[in-house]
Amino acid sequence: EVQAARCSAGHLSPAHAEVCRVCGVRMPLPPEPFWTARPVLGRLVFSNGDVVTLDRGLVLGRAPRIPDGHTGDQPNLVKLNDPTNEVSSQHLEVRLDHWYVLVVDLGSTNGTEVRLPGQDPMRLRPGTPLPIEPGTVVNLAEVLRFVFEVVA
């Protein structure tokens, strides 16, 4: 569960948010927070046309499996088609932590590059979670990329 508030259009956002995470309208003041099941936090739109909903965590790779020592809800295993084999078998984990979406490189061979909106691209350090925001582009081994989007 997460603590939430509704904007005037009815979208759920974090209780402390100044603007709606979906439509950008100012949140009511004072907020009327309440506890609710975490909503879908968005989707990943891949350069190959695939779309994956963020209703739970994900493990991405050519042969994904649940990482050793994983706790909590079982992540969705997303098999990526890469005929070049540049994307690792276990490449990237996408974690959902309350309202946050985090990406974690799983020690991939060819790395993961992240470009947050308005910033220069940066290479992820394996095992170090990085929070991302809508509009972030994540490039897996310079072969396949996705954009994180929030949806109503």
Image: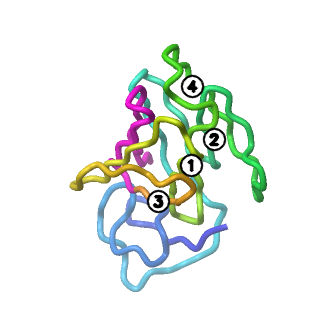
Disc ID at residue 130: 3
Q: Residue at x 68, y 39 (%)?
A: 76
Q: Give the mark nearer the N terminus: 2 vs 3.
A: 2
The residue to which callout 2 is attached is 59
Q: Nearer the viewer, residue 60 or 128?
A: 128
Please identify the quadrant where the N terminus is shown: bottom right
116 lies left or right of 128: left
The residue closer to the viewer here, 95 or 53, is 95
User: Badge 4: few (under 14), some or many (20 or more) residues near its Cα, within 10 Å?
Assistant: some
Residue on which disc 1 sits = 94
Magenta region includes residue 145: yes
Most extreme residue toward the front is 109
Name the residue: 62% across, 60% down: 38
**How far, Cα to Cα, is label 2 from label 3?**
15 Å
Q: Quadrant of residue 95?
A: bottom right
Residue 7: % across, % down: 40, 66
- The residue where tag 4 is placed is 80
Cα separation, mark 1 vs mark 2, equals: 6 Å
Q: Are marks 4 and 3 in contact (CB under 8 Å)?
A: no
Identify the magenta region.
Answer: 133-152
